Each structure stands twice: as structure tokens, then as C-alpha cells.
Image (cartoon, coloured by chain):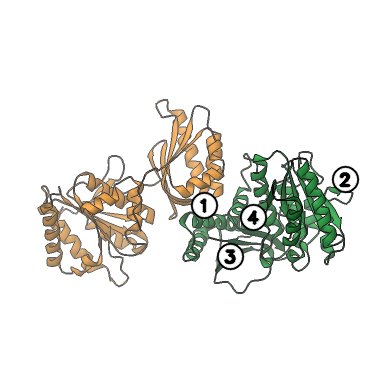
């Protein structure tokens, strides 16, 4: 730790923030922030840890992240009502200004999680977004306190795992280097495409996930990536006969985009199909109006029975 | 959508006109046609001014008669919108009835400034109803207030309806020719909009956000609001894709819902009235405006020297 060496992990099938570590991620888009947060939260919930999500109150507060968790089929309402997942205003964290106070707060939170029988404590949230914050000092103190706590509680029920999220657009490259330097782990979440409106991630060579909005400005890239995935599927005899697009987090698809998906599927060889998974109702309606029900090589599944958290 | 120069062979619609001398003559003629059709066991649809409708129903009864929507507020009437609505109404009707006849009559209340509503309506009906094997019989006054009404009626009907059946109309012109020959009817001007935004291809997200924000508090449910946002998105996309790099959206929130105009500064349209027909499934383009027309209560497109303009009304 003292060496200052930073461990870079890549989010994906095998990569995630190691339990008992303090990591940061610098996201280039809102969709990336939501993806990273939801993945970190759901990993903690699966490990029976208590997860505290600090939100700044901007951009709809915790709503978008809870929505993304529901997209990822995390039982949001249940974990919120059991207290395993807690959503807390970041203002509470900011009020703890001195290093002593931060340390005290961490001890308090870890002890409470332990007392309630959780296997550990997980903290995440976007840091230092408040317009009034002059940034450096309090964050550095907070990071130092978290580092110390993580070091002194590497295992056991009071084990702490923390992921600090930063919005790339708010900081200079120098500042980002400083931020990375004070976190023992840096999490990266690579995307096949991310323009701030639409984010496409590749989970397998033939499985993509779309998050955000697809319109005139970015629709061409979708078809291009689907065609590349089909190419992969055709080249490899072991690859599945389906190209899968998870659309759980696609909130808008325009008519030309829907027509393009229907046409792309129709041009698939007979052996292969395009599967659109967990399609939201609004997107499903557009697909319906654009002939999706008549495209034999297109399969559309909606996220039936998926409870979206209120608000 | 392709508008052929003559009545295309695949056209199944039989669209005819008959002229009358005044209100009494109109009712006499309407009643005679209605009675004959009902006696032949045909399903009758009526799109008549209120007084004429009442008189016809008194004479022939209501059995086998469907009443189509006619209550358009005068300031809002749009011939192209009515033609899309008629296609929707009649498509539903022909699903259950083998033989359908639509009886229409001119209503001076919808003339607007120059009677252009009727020219646009009949030209657009030739497009939206082309694939329906039905009779559409329109009664027009021989001496209307606006000469435009007479010229339009003469040019838009491929057939003349007479006591001895349909005769070809030598004055018939295809919709493209009719519409190219006259300025597209511009709707009544509105006051200054509540909000306006200039946008380009990369700002469509902001356009959607603006529309979604304007819809809150107007009583739209979530599904309807999403559909209206989609409709506006498609028109805005067309404006920057086919019109001009920059376009402008203007919004008015009213008691009856949202009114939206989108203006681009592009050149003349390929199609005089785009989006009237569902494009062939293999055709990748042209579906956006058609879907937008299905989702809006009024969708009126017009072109002038400054560019292409679209006004839409969407109720909750």
C-alpha cells in the first residue's frame, strides 16, 4: 500500500473490486457510472454485505441507479426494505469533515452492519460533486481514513469494501491522476461504444448490452456491432447460433433504429437469430410498430414481472 | 409512398363525386344513395355535416350505418390528418364488413381561408385509401363559396357518381399533380410558443427531454407520453436528416394537450404529403412520419419558400 502501486482491475465476468479493498473508478458517462455502481452494489448484496449508496441528489438522486439495479434483476425493493441496501444522501458524509470524524463514522457504520448480522460493509457513491466543494482537502482526508480502515480490517464482519466514483468531465487530467494515486485499486469498465447518450458493452463475443438512448446520432453503430457479433458467431463453430442484445437499460429507440434491427435480423442466415432481451415496454412498442412480430429470425423478450422501484 | 401520375392499376378504391344544388337537394341525393346501398346489404359509413347526417338517419334508420368522426374544431381541421383518420376508421370497418360505402359531404365550416382543406383531404384520401376496395362518394355543392372547393372536387375524383353508376371523370388529376399545383394549406398562426429550441442531429435528446418536460402536468399517462415523445422525435429527426442541419421546435401547452411545431429550412419535399401510407416492410425509410401520424390527433405538414413545417396536436 505504502509503495503507491495501483492495482488496475477491469470490470467484467471475472473482474471486480476485490472485497476488502478501496477502489476508485472515473466514469466517462452517466451510463458507465450506473453500470459500475449497480455491479458493485449487486456483488455486495450477493456476498451478504450491507451496501450503502451515497447519492448527491443531482440527476434524479438514487433513481437512475436503482433503476439500473432493477434492469440487472437485483431485488431492489426487498433489499431496501430489509436494510441490506441503504440509500443515503452524500451530505451526511460531507458533514464528517475531519479525519477523526470520518474514521468515527466508518467505525460506527461497520459496527452497525456487524450488529445486524451482515457479512461486511460496502460503500459507494459519486464523490465531491457538490458545486460548493473546493474538492481536495476533505476528499483526501476521507480517502486516507478509508485506506486506514480497510488496512486495519482486512477480514471479518467489519471488512470494508469501498468504491469511489468520479465523473471524468469534472476533473483535470492531473487531478484524476491524483485521485487514482490515493486509491489502492482502480476499476475500469471498458465499453465497445459510449457517446454519453448510448453505451454498448460486450459481454461475450456474441452478446452485447445497450444502455441509454439510441437515435439518429448513434444508431449506425448498433447495426455495425450486431453485424460484427454475427460475424463472430459464424466464424466460430462453438459460438451460439444467437446474437444477443440485452436491452434492459435501453430507454429509447427511434423508428429507424427499430427498423434497422428488424432488417438486420431478417438478413441473418437461416441458421442464426437475433435475440433482444428484457426489452422495456416503450421500446417493445416501437419494435412492434416496425414489423418485429413478422421477422422470423428476430426474438423479442420483455422483462415480464420485473418490478421497477417506484420513483 | 409512391404517387403515380394516373390512377394506378393496383388502386382498389372507387372515389367519386356528385354535385348538388343546395341543402335540400343534398339531403335528397344523400338519402337516395344511402337507401340504395343499404338495400343492397352494404355497410354504410357517413361523414356528413350534422344537419345532413340527422336528415339521412331519419330517412334510412341507423341499422347498418357507421358514423365517422366529423367534429373537428375549425381552426384545427387538416385535410391530410382527416385522410389518415378515415383510413384507420375504414380499415377497422372492412375487417368485419365485406362491402363498405362511405358517403361524405362538403361542410363549409371546414373551408378555412380558401377551401383548401377539401382539396387536400380528397387528394390525400386517394393515397390513404388506395388499397381498400370500397366506394367513397363525395357530395359537393355546384356553387360553393370558394371556387377552390369546386376545382379540387373536379380534379380529385377519378369517377363521377351518376344515377346510372360510375363514369370516368375526364378532369381527374393524380394527387401529386393536384398538390404540386397549389400552396399547401398553412394552419392558422398561433401566438408565441411557451418554449422553443434550436437543434441539430446531436441534440435530439434535448428535444425529447423538452417534450417530456412539457407533457408533465398535462394529464398524459406514461405510455401516451412516451408515444408522443416518439412522434416528435421522428418529426425532429426528419427535419435534420432531410430538411436542414439546424431546425427549430416550438411547443405550446394547452388545456387540450400539447401543440408542437417543427420548422426546417430545407428544399421542396420529395413527396407532397409524406407519411400518408405505411411503407412496404422492405423499405427502410419513411416509417417514422407514418407512425407519428398514427400517434397524433393532428399532424399537418406544409412547405413554403422558407422550408418545411410540421404542426402536431397530441391530447392526453
Q: Where residue A239 sits: x, y (%)?
A: 41, 29
Q: CA distance from mark 2 to mark 1?
A: 47 Å
Asked if residue B82 is positioned above or below residue A284 in the image, the reply reads below
Q: Kindly identify which chain the residue marked by label 2 belongs to.
A: B
Q: Label 3: state its secondary structure.
A: strand
Look at discs 2 and 1 and give the one toward the viewer.
2
Tell me the number on the disc at residue B259.
Answer: 3
Which colour represents chain B? green
Taking the image as shown, residue A310 lies to the left or right of residue B13, namely: left
- Is disc 2 in the same subunit as disc 1? no
Residue that carries the numbered disc 2 in the rendered image: B168
Q: CA distance from mark 3 to mark 4?
A: 22 Å
Q: CA distance from mark 3 to mark 2?
A: 41 Å
**For marks 2 and 4 on the same chain, the one whose residue lies earlier in the sequence:** 2
Q: Where residue A210 sits: x, y (%)?
A: 42, 46
- Is disc 1 in the same subunit as disc 4? no
Q: Label 2: state its secondary structure.
A: strand
Q: Kindly identify which chain the residue marked by label 4 belongs to.
A: B
Tell me the number on the disc at residue A215.
Answer: 1
Amino acid at each position: 500500500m505504502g509503495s503507491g502501486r495501483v492495482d488496475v482491475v477491469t470490470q467484467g465476468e471475472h473482474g471486480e473490486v476485490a472485497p476488502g479493498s478501496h477502489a476508485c473508478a472515473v466514469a466517462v458517462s452517466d451510463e458507465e457510472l450506473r453500470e459500475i455502481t449497480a455491479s458493485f452494489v449487486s456483488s455486495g448484496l450477493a456476498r451478504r454485505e450491507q451496501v450503502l449508496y451515497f447519492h448527491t441528489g443531482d440527476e434524479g438522486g438514487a433513481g437512475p441507479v436503482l433503476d439500473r439495479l432493477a434492469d440487472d434483476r437485483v431485488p431492489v425493493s426487498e433489499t431496501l426494505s430489509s436494510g441490506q441496501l441503504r440509500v443515503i444522501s452524500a451530505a451526511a458524509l460531507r458533514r464528517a469533515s475531519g479525519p477523526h470524524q470520518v474514521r468515527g463514522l466508518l467505525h460506527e457504520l461497520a459496527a452497525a452492519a456487524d450488529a445486524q448480522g451482515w457479512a461486511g460493509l460496502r460503500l459507494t457513491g459519486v464523490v465531491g460533486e457538490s458545486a460548493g466543494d473546493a474538492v481536495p482537502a476533505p476528499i483526501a482526508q476521507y480517502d486516507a481514513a478509508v485506506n486506514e480502515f480497510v488496512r486495519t480490517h482486512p477480514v471479518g464482519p467489519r471488512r470494508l469494501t469501498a468504491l469511489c466514483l468520479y465523473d471524468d468531465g469534472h476533473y483535470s487530467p492531473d487531478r484524476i491522476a491524483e485521485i487514482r494515486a490515493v486509491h489502492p485499486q482502480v476499476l475500469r469498465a471498458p465499453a465497445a461504444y459510449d457517446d454519453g447518450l448510448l453505451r454498448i458493452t460486450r459481454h461475450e463475443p456474441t452478446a452485447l448490452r445497450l444502455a441509454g438512448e439510441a437515435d439518429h446520432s448513434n444508431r449506425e453503430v448498433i447495426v455495425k456491432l450486431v453485424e460484427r457479433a454475427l460475424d463472430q458467431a459464424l466464424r466460430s463453430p462453438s459460438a451460439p447460433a444467437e446474437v444477443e442484445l440485452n436491452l434492459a437499460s435501453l430507454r429509447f429507440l427511434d423508428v429507424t433504429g427499430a427498423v434497422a434491427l428488424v432488417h438486420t435480423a431478417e438478413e441473418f442466415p437461416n441458421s442464426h437469430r437475433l435475440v433482444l432481451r428484457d426489452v422495456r415496454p416503450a421500446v417493445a412498442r416501437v419494435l412492434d410498430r416496425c414489423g418485429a412480430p413478422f421477422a422470423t429470425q428476430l426474438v423479442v423478450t420483455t422483462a415480464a414481472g420485473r418490478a421497477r422501484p417506484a420513483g | 409512398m409512391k404517387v403515380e401520375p394516373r390512377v394506378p392499376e393496383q388502386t382498389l378504391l372507387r372515389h367519386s363525386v356528385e354535385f348538388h344544388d343546395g341543402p335540400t337537394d343534398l339531403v335528397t341525393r344523400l338519402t337516395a344513395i344511402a337507401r340504395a346501398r343499404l338495400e343492397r346489404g352494404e355497410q354504410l359509413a357517413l361523414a356528413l355535416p350534422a344537419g345532413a347526417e340527422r336528415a339521412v338517419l331519419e330517412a334510412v334508420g341507423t341499422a347498418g350505418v357507421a358514423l365517422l368522426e366529423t367534429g373537428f374544431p375549425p381552426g384545427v381541421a387538416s385535410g391530410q390528418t382527416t385522410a389518415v383518420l378515415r383510413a384507420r376508421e375504414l380499415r377497422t370497418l372492412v375487417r368485419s364488413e365485406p362491402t363498405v360505402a362511405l358517403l361524405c359531404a362538403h361542410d363549409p365550416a371546414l373551408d378555412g381561408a380558401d377551401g383548401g382543406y377539401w382539396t387536400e383531404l380528397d387528394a390525400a384520401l386517394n393515397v390513404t385509401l388506395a388499397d381498400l376496395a370500397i366506394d367513397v362518394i363525395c357530395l359537393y355543392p355546384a356553387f360553393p363559396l370558394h371556387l377552390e372547393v369546386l376545382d379540387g372536387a373536379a380534379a380529385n375524383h377519378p369517377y363521377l357518381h351518376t344515377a346510372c353508376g360510375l363514369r370516368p371523370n375526364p378532369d381527374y388529376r393524380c394527387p401529386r399533380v393536384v398538390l404540386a399545383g397549389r400552396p399547401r394549406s398553412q394552419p392558422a398562426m398561433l401566438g408565441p410558443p411557451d418554449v422553443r429550441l434550436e437543434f441539430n442531429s446531436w441534440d435530439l435528446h434535448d428535444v425529447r427531454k423538452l417534450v417530456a418536460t412539457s407533457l408533465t402536468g398535462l394529464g398524459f399517462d406514461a405510455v401516451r407520453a412516451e408515444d408522443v415523445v416518439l412522434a416528435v422525435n421522428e418529426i425532429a429527426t426528419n427535419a435534420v436528416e432531410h430538411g436542414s442541419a439546424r431546425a427549430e421546435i416550438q411547443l405550446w401547452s394547452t388545456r387540450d394537450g400539447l401543440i408542437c411545431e417543427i420548422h426546417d429550412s430545407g428544399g421542396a419535399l420529395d413527396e407532397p404529403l409524406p407519411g400518408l401510407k405505411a411503407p412496404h416492410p422492405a423499405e427502410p425509410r419513411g416509417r417514422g412520419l407514418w407512425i407519428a401520424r398514427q400517434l397524433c390527433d393532428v399532424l399537418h405538414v406544409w412547405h413554403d419558400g422558407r422550408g418545411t413545417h410540421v404542426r402536431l396536436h397530441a391530447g392526453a
